[in-house]
Amino acid sequence: MILTIDTASQNASIVLSRGETCISAIHNHVQKTHAAFVQSGIQAIFSKTKYSLVDLDAVSVVAGPGSYTGLRVGMASAKGICYALNKPLILLDALKLMALSVIRMPQFSNFIGMICPMIDARRMEVFAALYNHQLEIIFAPGAMMVEKDFLETFLQKNKILCIGDGSLKFQQVCVNPQAIFQNISYDENTISYLSFQAFLKKDFASLAYSEPLYVKEFYTPGPGHKH
């Protein structure tokens, strides 16, 4: 049984899952109230399901990229529970969750291009990564400037499905027909699945040294970009 805390974005979630199946989820859609929501959300989900913290086998947290304050809140809450109960900590990547959501959708089962999840940052900036359809990283999560030739090197040979609220910025300037746009994010079912896969692999994080995924330097992947 895994409890997941997600306060990385506008929409926060507390998810309780058994194996890869979501048992229950509680959401909050007001970003500035995420800090207050976490503890009340955790209490509510255990009250609703009749389970308790001692039933947990692990705690996972969406570690970013995302809101600085939200990431700190989620990480601190997850670490606190792990310390108190001596449970392992799992870190989830928001961009990987988004890409995995696409892979798990039946309508994209035959899609053989790449997937570029994008999270809105500031101005014409996004947090983004690029994956193939096997969820292998083409370029790692980073903070990037969205310009007309953004992803052009990859678009020359591949269709790229651009997803997430950040993709709307790229859609405004992109003229390459190889780019496809869908405002897809992830849900509690994808969270439950990825958390369980990490648990099976014992992909646990250090309680002492784990930090949210802060991405500060902005760049544009181009011909000279190193994967």
Image (tube, rainbow, N blue to C red):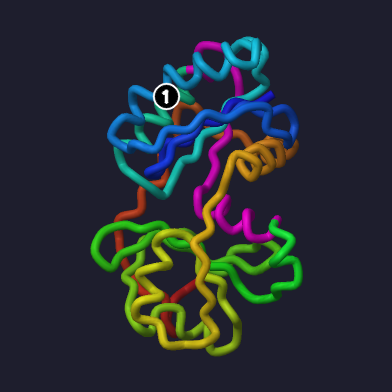
Tell me the crowding category of disc 1: few under 14, some 14 to 19, or many 20 or more residues within 10 angstroms, Cα based. Answer: many
Please tell me which residue lies in front, 65 or 23: 23
Q: Which amino acid does label 1 sit on?
A: Val
Q: Is residue 83 left or right of residue 173?
A: right
Identify which residue is drawn at 30% across, 64% down: 125
Q: Is residue 79 left or right of residue 111?
A: left
**Residue 140 position in % (x across, y down):** 50, 62
Q: In this view, does 114 lie to the left or right of 40?
A: right
Give the image quarter of residue 158: bottom right
> Could you tell me which quadrant the N terminus lies in?
top right
Q: Residue furthest left?
A: 123
Identify which residue is drawn at 73% across, 34% down: 21
Q: Is residue 220 placed above or below 203 in the rendered structure?
A: below
Please tell me which residue lies in front, 161 or 90: 161
**Residue 68 position in % (x across, y down):** 31, 42
**Does residue 13 belong to the magenta stretch?**
no
Give the image quarter of residue 2: top right
Residue 116 seen in this snapshot? yes
Identify which residue is drawn at 36% across, 62% down: 126
**Residue 66 position in % (x across, y down):** 38, 47
Residue behind mark 1: 38
What kind of element bears circle 1?
helix
Bounds of the magenta segment: 81-104
